[in-house]
Amino acid sequence: MDKAYYAKRGLFIGITALFCAFYFFGPTLFTFKSSLVEQNGEIEYLKVIYTRVGSSRGAKSIKSELKFTLNSTQSVYVLMKNIGQSRYNERFEKLERQLNNSGRVTVWVKKSQKEEYKPTVFQIADRNGTILYDFNESKSLSRVGFLVSFCLGIFGIGLFIKHKYSDRIKSL
């Protein structure tokens, strides 16, 4: 067993995991309410879509998406969640009913994504200002992914450091 080989692999995996944590999960997780803008409008299109997805290993699951557009923007707003083998996402179905009943909604997105085709949705409110999809709910999806990637990154880098500098660590 070549420990140096595994230490180098650990370093590569660690750096990659840290990069993924900050690149994929960090922008959502470290967004503040002050950096969001409101977009108001009447709902033009609203639908919950279920799609069967498969992994490279052959595992299959179902992805649910709540998609909607507003008459005041060119953007498509999408909330997405993998629901495993379930064929029904109660949260998105309820949200669809609430949005249909309201007709007019307010969506909060990042200022930098205001003109994008598919901006990240951070909060949704109905015509009365009642919050239907909360800022914290949108960020909670990124917390787990960030923590797992960050911990894996620290572990991989720590494995490399332990192997590379084990003599110095023992002498402390």
Image: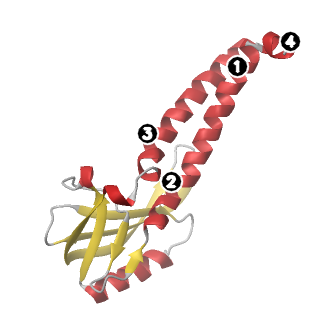
Q: Which mark is residue 18?
A: none
Disc 2 marks a residue whose amino acid type is Ser
Comparing labels 1 and 4, the label whose residue is closer to the camera: 4
- Residue 58: x and y in percent read 56, 48
- Where residue 132 sits, quadrant-wise, is bottom left
157 with respect to 110 (left or right): right
Give the CA distance from mark 3 to mark 4.
Answer: 37 Å
How many neighbours does mark 2 have within 10 angstroms: few (below 14), some (14-19), or many (20 or more)? some
Of the numbered discs 4 and 2, the one sitting upstream in the chain is 2
Q: Nearer the viewer, mark 3 or mark 4?
A: 4
Q: Please, what is the three-letter code of the amino acid marked with disc 3?
A: Tyr
Residue at (46, 45) in percent of width and height? 26
Q: Secondary structure at mark 2?
A: helix
Mark 4: amino acid: Ser
In the picture, measured across the screen, residue 92 lies left or right of residue 171, that is left
| Residue 171 numbered tag | 4
Q: On residue 142, which mark appears?
A: 2
- Asked whether the residues under the numbered discs 3 and 4 touch, taking CB atoms below 8 Å apart as contact, a structural biologist would say no
* Residue 35 visible (yes or no): yes
The residue tagged 3 is 23
> Is residue 58 depicted above or below 67 in this figure?
above
Q: Earlier in the sequence, mark 1 or mark 4?
A: 1
Residue at figure coordinates x 37%, y 63% from the top left: 122
The C terminus is located in which quarter? top right
Q: Amino acid at mark 1?
A: Ile
**Mark 3 / mark 4, whichever is N-terminal:** 3
Splitting the image into 4 quarters, where does residue 159 fall?
Answer: top right
Q: SS at mark 4?
A: helix
